[in-house]
Image: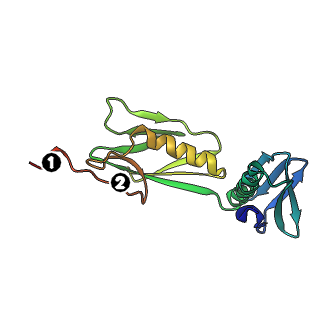
Amino acid sequence: MSRVGRKPVPIPAGVQVQVEGQRVTVRGPKGELSWEVDPSIEVQVEDGRVVVRRSGDQPRLRALHGLTRALINNMVIGVSQGFEKRLELVGVGYRAQMQGRKLVLSVGYSHPVEIEPPPDVDIRVEGTTQIVVSGIDKQKVGQVAADIRAVRPPEPYKGKGILYVGEVIRRKAGKGARGR
């Protein structure tokens, strides 16, 4: 049995989980998330916990079991605490700024790059080189952060680019380091 799927999801104070048919709705202080569960997976709320069960033991169902539990757990965490991804710009002259809701990046191209986040994801800039992406939906926060990083991924020779805070870039030796 799936070790992840077997573990019940605790419901913190201030969070409500509602199951109607195959739709799971989670409401909390930060907002509301809803998701349609696969018909072969059963979700129930039992004494302050969400329990996920599957109907069979096929590999597809085992995979869905753990996935469903993990997604419901992310929904509960999202509406109670929220998610956040931090990025930093490394490079001479690289900077970020906000223009209304739009993020404007100057990262060595001939033009500034503008990124408009979806309505339920917030972006803020700390200083000129730190970007914080936050929201209640873990998938959307991660996707927006990945889209920002894709504007100028870090390169292995000088380490310049947009990278996640704490990310380690494996550096390569340049042309001058080859053996003679």
Instruction: Give the class, few, some or many, for how many residues have Cα within 10 Å of label 1's Cα (few <14, many ≥20).
Output: few
Above or below: residue 96 compared with residue 66: above
Q: Nearer the viewer, residue 42 or 179?
A: 179
Q: Residue furthest left?
A: 180
Residue 101 placement: quadrant: top right
Query: For the image shown, how many numbered marks are present on the structure?
Result: 2
Label 2 and label 1: CA atoms lie apart by 21 Å
The structure residue drawn at horizontal position 78% and vertical position 66%, both measured from the top left corner, is: 8
Residue 4 placement: quadrant: bottom right
Q: Position of residue 160 (x, y in %)?
A: 31, 47
Q: Position of residue 62 (x, y in %)?
A: 75, 54
The structure residue drawn at horizontal position 26% and vertical position 48%, both measured from the top left corner, is: 158
Quadrant where the N terminus lies?
A: bottom right
Q: Position of residue 46 (x, y in %)?
A: 88, 66
Whether residue 164 sits left or right of residue 123 in the image: it is left
Q: Earlier in the sequence, mark 2 or mark 1?
A: 2
Mark linked to residue 178: 1
Q: Nearer the viewer, residue 121 or 71?
A: 71
Q: Amino acid at mark 1?
A: Arg
Q: Nearer the viewer, residue 172 or 78?
A: 172
Mark linked to residue 169: 2
**Could you tell me which secondary element the residue under label 1 belongs to?**
loop
**Could you tell me which secondary element the residue under label 2 belongs to?**
loop
The structure residue drawn at horizontal position 52% and vertical position 54%, both measured from the top left corner, is: 85
Q: Amino acid at mark 2?
A: Ile
Q: Position of residue 133 (x, y in %)?
A: 54, 50
